Amino acid sequence: MVHTSDGPKELNVHVADGVITSVGMNAAPAGAKTVDASGMYVLPGAIDVHVHSRDPGFPQKEDFGTLTAAAAAGGVTTVIDMPNTVPAVDADGVLESKAALARGKARVDFGLWGLIRSSSTPAELEGLAAAGAIGFKAYLGYAFSRSRKQVRSSLDLDDPDLEAPPDYGTLARLAPVIAELGLPLAIHAEDPAILGAFRRPLETYADLLAARPAEAEAVAIAAAAEIAGSSGVRLHIAHLSSAIGLAAAHELIRAGAPLSLETCPQYLWRSAEDFAKVGAAMKVFPPIRTKGDRDALVDGLAKGTIKIVATDHAPHADDEKAASFDDAPAGSPGVQTLYVSCLELARRLGDVWLAPRWVAEAPARLAGLHDAKGTIAPGYDADLVIVDPNRATRVRPKAMRSRQRHGALNGLEFGFSIKEVYLRGSPVSAPRWSARAAGRLVRPARH
Ligand SMILES: [Zn+2]
């Protein structure tokens, strides 16, 4: 069964030179290599628009090799990497060196976000766009270390090395430039003033929820959307985590704001009650909240208000995560289980074929890749995933290819398994994967 834009159909997919040449009932030409996928699903490769390769900067946490091995194993054939590697991707030269480094290691295709600093200039953003950035990310409330070229969560603004975080003023100043470039502006949407007012030591999971209340998300979304509305920039909300954040965004979308929403499997499958069994692997920012928040997000996805599921794959070394709850860094791996978790959720919502829309079609539009990826149709890259709908996947640390093996979804079982994965026609998943790292930089189409 092949996922096409007209729904699932029993068809043959023909591929030549890495590109889909036809989708239909035609028999394979004589001598062609064939793959029998009867009884299986044939889906477009997923595009995870929110991953952290940690490369360059934190090789003990992850690098492009381990990130993309995990991606390939999970049916993710394109990853879009966040810019808070070190040095942070705040100028064209940094983006070019990062792309060169990834090219030698990546097993799947990759795109790169550029970073917005409070000091970013229009010329820097234009340079990043020319170098291939798929869009720009602003970390509201996160400072920047000038000496280490690093995005920092520290709020100690007396430190002369720290440049002030980007704020709504930064967004208002740069949104028209980004709109002109035709690229999306993604934000980490937690209002810094609200986080500042509720700051506290984190001893328990309840402290984490109290320290990062959902109001912070709703306020940041509303403020940024006002700015997006007046400049026309496409505003993208990363990792939406709350019912009231969703409600705020829903109102704005109805009123015509150019807003896209992304949530992540950890917010769709977990709630605060799970902390007792999952532990610090569940510590992520924004936090995994109540069952009510989780159900609202699932409903938002079912109704199409939320169109994108990405992972915020953010690994740390296992010993870092084993520190006290307050000291353990926030983040969880997730790229390897994106597809199977979404297929299971979509099936429970009554239409399993929604999953490729959340992880392939809608992400391709956000990233400007919708002429080449995210769809099974002639002319598109042959990024194909064969899924067995009768074999379950249990999330086990041992099976994970990311450097951090313990993640927020540990122990869950999804009723699908990834059988084979092809990147531009070549197998990239075990056991048939090639040893060569064939991943390429993807650039957004300029329309
Ligand atoms: Zn992130």
Image (spheres, helix red, strand yellow):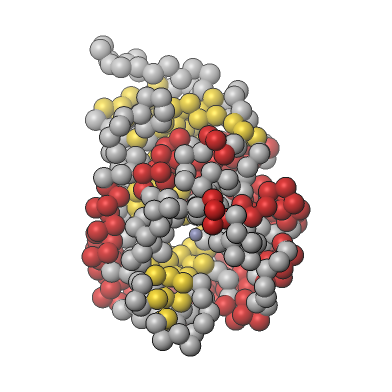
Residue found 24% across the figure and 58% down from its top: 97
Q: Quadrant of residue 137?
A: bottom left
Task: Measuring from the top left, give residue 19's x and y in whole percent.
Answer: 29, 33
Q: Quadrant of residue 422?
A: top left
Residue found 55% across the figure and 61% down from its top: 329
Task: Measuring from the top left, give residue 76's x and y in whole percent.
Answer: 44, 40
Depicted 136 relative to depicted 271: above or below:
below
Identify which residue, 19 or 387, lies in the foreground.
Answer: 387
Depicted 426 relative to depicted 323: above or below:
above
Depicted 310 relative to depicted 25: above or below:
below
Residue found 51% across the figure and 47% down from its top: 404
Identify which residue, 267 or 313, lies in the foreground.
Answer: 313
Task: Measuring from the top left, give residue 149's x and y in whole percent.
Answer: 35, 71
- Which residue ends up furthest to the top in the rendered image? 30
Residue 100 falls left or right of residue 9:
left
Task: Measuring from the top left, give residue 176's x and y in whole percent.
Answer: 37, 76
Residue found 28% across the figure and 16% down from its top: 32
Q: Is residue 145 visible in this depiction of the protein?
A: yes
